[in-house]
Amino acid sequence: MFMRKTAMLMLLAVSLLLSGSLAFANGQKESQAAAAPAASTSSTAQLLASTVHPPTFDDSKLFGLRDALSQAMQGKDMSKVNTWMVVNILATYWVAGKEGDAQAARELGIKAQYEGPTQGQLSTQVSMYQTLASTGANGLFTSVIDPTSEARILNNAVDKGVNLVAIDSPVPASVHSLVYVGTPNYAAGQAAGEAMKKALPQGGDVAILTGSLTAPNALQRIAGFKAALAGSNVQVATTQNDNGSAATASSNADSVIASMPNLKGMYGVYSYDGPAAAVAVKSKGEIGKIMVVADDNEPGTIAGLKNGTVAASIIQQPYMQGYLGAYITAAMEVLGKQAVTKILQPFETDGVISTGVGTLTQANLAADESYNTEISTGG
């Protein structure tokens, strides 16, 4: 009797052990399947609401383009899409762009892939382009550091089947990009000039801090800024190039304040230039005496708006550049370049899809902070 009970208990234990092992194995398969990215057709992710945009922007046309591309790709196999976002520098400015890319990837059921040189090194970006073109990438939406010297590299990538879209900084016709998605940079510079004139009604000398004197976006902004100041009593006294280094931008800001006793304002072209100017103004006790106009909404710029060192910041939409860059390059791969060109026609002007320009001040700062919170949590 004892042996029979023992045998029965052993059989029961083996049975429970086997059933537990099978359940664990099935659970492993289910969790692996759930973790696997969508391989094809349309994703079930909810599309970003068209109400999500920064203050003063009207993005109805941009969302119209998104909807047209999304509808055209419904039911298409997305498994071969291998598109990359390559930026000009890994600055805080691009955090929102990376989030836009990630949101588009969720909606499309593809992988979000992002990289860029840490300090805006041209050679590093060239190497990235070459590696991606030779290792299977078929999409590239990118802010090009120097389109003149990088044209051959980019065109070689296009010849290998890489679908190319320029974002943030336009490229000349010699670079075979399908379209430019980004800020109208000359208009952004003009907006900065208007903000500086408003901040300096009595006029005075101003300095420009920039991260490049070759990148088209920087050159266009500087030109727009100077055009807005033409005929006014505000004059550009110096332009300081930090070559993509935030540390150099800080030392440049300190130097111009120390060497220019009549300095009344500073315009920061790159996203980190404004914060560098704001910190220098505050540390020298010049709040209210030297006015800063920045570009973008880095944390240092927001702090400057709050403490009065920054009068205004000209904002753009890196989020939409990443978002639409992913959509367009994915569509080029699954629909073909000719079909996408036809879809883009109602939404572009002379090869440009403008993501607009806005002016950020203390008055609309709360609305901008709400927008950034919303995009950081997936819209």
Image (spheres, rainbow, N blue to C red):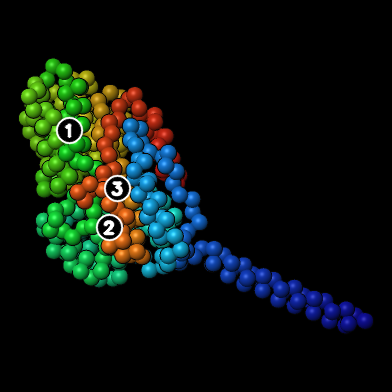
From the image, state whether disc 3 or disc 1 is nearer to you: 3
Q: Position of residue 373 (x, y in %)?
A: 42, 39
Residue 61 visible in the displayed image: yes
| Label 1 Cα neighbours within 10 Å, binned few <14 / some 14-19 / many ≥20 | many
Image mark for residue 190? 1
Q: 63 or 291, which lies in front?
A: 63
Q: Position of residue 260 (x, y in %)?
A: 8, 26
Q: Position of residue 130 (x, y in %)?
A: 21, 66
Residue contact between numbered discs 3 and 2, judged by CB atoms under 8 Å: no
> Which quadrant would the C terminus be assigned to in this image?
top left
Mark 2 lies on residue = 341
Relative to 328, is 347 above or below? above
- Secondary structure of the residue carrying numbered label 2: helix
Q: Quadrant of residue 164?
A: bottom left
* Residue beneath the point at 30% across and 45% down: 318
Q: 364 or 228, which lies in front?
A: 228
Mark 3 lies on residue = 347
Q: Quadrant of residue 241?
A: top left
Kindly report the distance in space between the C-alpha atoms of the residues bearing marks 1 and 2: 30 Å
Sequence-wise, the earlier of marks 1 and 2 is 1
Q: Position of residue 271 (x, y in %)?
A: 24, 40
Sequence-wise, the earlier of marks 3 and 1 is 1
Q: Amino acid at mark 1?
A: Gln
Relative to 149, is 238 above or below? above
Kindly report the distance in space between the C-alpha atoms of the residues bearing marks 3 and 1: 24 Å
From the image, state whether disc 1 or disc 2 is nearer to you: 2
* Residue beneath the point at 23% across and 22% down: 287
Residue 143 visible in the displayed image: no
Q: Amino acid at mark 3?
A: Phe
Relative to 325, is 251 above or below? above
Q: Amino acid at mark 2?
A: Thr
Sequence-wise, the earlier of marks 3 and 2 is 2
